[in-house]
Amino acid sequence: MAYIGGQDKPTDADAGPGCPFCRIPALSDEDGLVVARGETAYVVMNLYPYNSGHVLVCPYRHVADYTDLTDAEVAEVAALTRTAMRVLRAVSGPHGFNLGMNQGDVAGAGIAAHLHQHVVPRWGGDSNFLPIVGRSRALPELLGDTRARLAAAWPGAGTGGTGADVDAKG
């Protein structure tokens, strides 16, 4: 309910301790639910997922608008998004994906102050009565367990690689 009510929701000026996306990189991968880290961006599990495996690709820098990203940030967000799709295909076998950024409160951004790209795996028939009747989703796996499986399958896992240089297959 604190999330729904907007308690501690950062504003555009809230970097560092006020912003969860600024705070997460300082945590361990397990505690922050970080799947992979790059030079300018990282991949993290969504605490409020639409589906199992729903990850977010976030720049480290506190920036709200896509047009304010540097060229290096744009390139790495794109590369990490592609790698996330490949890893999710290998680990979970989704039939498709929803990708996107909600820019601004009016566009549905839960945390508009810090840009983040959603990578949502989708399966045929994955929408059922729970989101409609129960206003809830049933996820078959704990976020920490999903994070561990995705991190283990990430290219370069354990070798310091970012996964951004994965080949175009998959």
Image: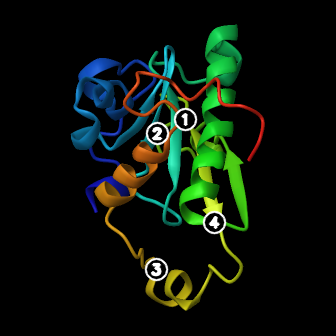
Q: Nearer the viewer, residue 169 or 18?
A: 169
Q: Quadrant of residue 64?
A: top right
Question: Helix or strand or loop: what does disc 3 sit on?
Answer: loop
Please state which of the two labelled residues, at mark 4 or mark 2, is closer to the viewer.
4
Q: Label 3 crowding class (10 Å Cα cut-off): few <14, some 14-19, many 20+?
A: few
What residue did someone put label 4 on?
93
Query: Which numbered dot is residue 116?
Result: 1
Question: Which quarter shows the N terminus?
Answer: bottom left
Q: Point out the tag, 4 or 3, that comes first from the N-terminus.
A: 4
Q: Tell me if residue 109 can be seen.
A: yes
Check whether the beta carbons of the residues at disc 2 and disc 1 lie within 8 A of each other.
Answer: yes
Q: Point out the tag, 3 or 1, that comes first from the N-terminus.
A: 1
Give the amino acid type for the residue marked by disc 3 in the picture.
Arg
Q: Position of residue 6 (x, y in %)?
A: 35, 48
What residue did someone put label 3 on?
135
Please state which of the two labelled residues, at mark 4 or mark 3, is closer to the viewer.
4
Query: Distance of mark 1 from mark 4, alpha carbons?
Result: 23 Å
What residue did someone put label 2 on?
111
Q: Nearer the viewer, residue 130 or 30?
A: 30
Give the amino acid type for the residue marked by disc 1 in the picture.
His
Q: Residue at x 61, y 25 (%)?
A: 164
Q: Position of residue 68 (x, y in %)?
A: 65, 13
Query: Distance of mark 4 from mark 3, alpha carbons?
Result: 26 Å
Q: Quadrant of residue 115?
A: top right
Query: Distance of mark 3 from mark 1, alpha carbons?
Result: 24 Å
Check whether the beta carbons of the residues at disc 2 and disc 3 lie within 8 A of each other.
Answer: no
Query: Distance of mark 4 from mark 2, alpha carbons?
Result: 29 Å
Query: Distance of mark 2 from mark 1, alpha carbons?
Result: 9 Å
Q: Nearer the viewer, residue 88 or 111?
A: 88
Give the amino acid type for the residue marked by disc 4 in the picture.
Gly
Query: Distance of mark 2 from mark 3, alpha carbons?
Result: 21 Å
Question: Helix or strand or loop: what does disc 1 sit on?
Answer: loop
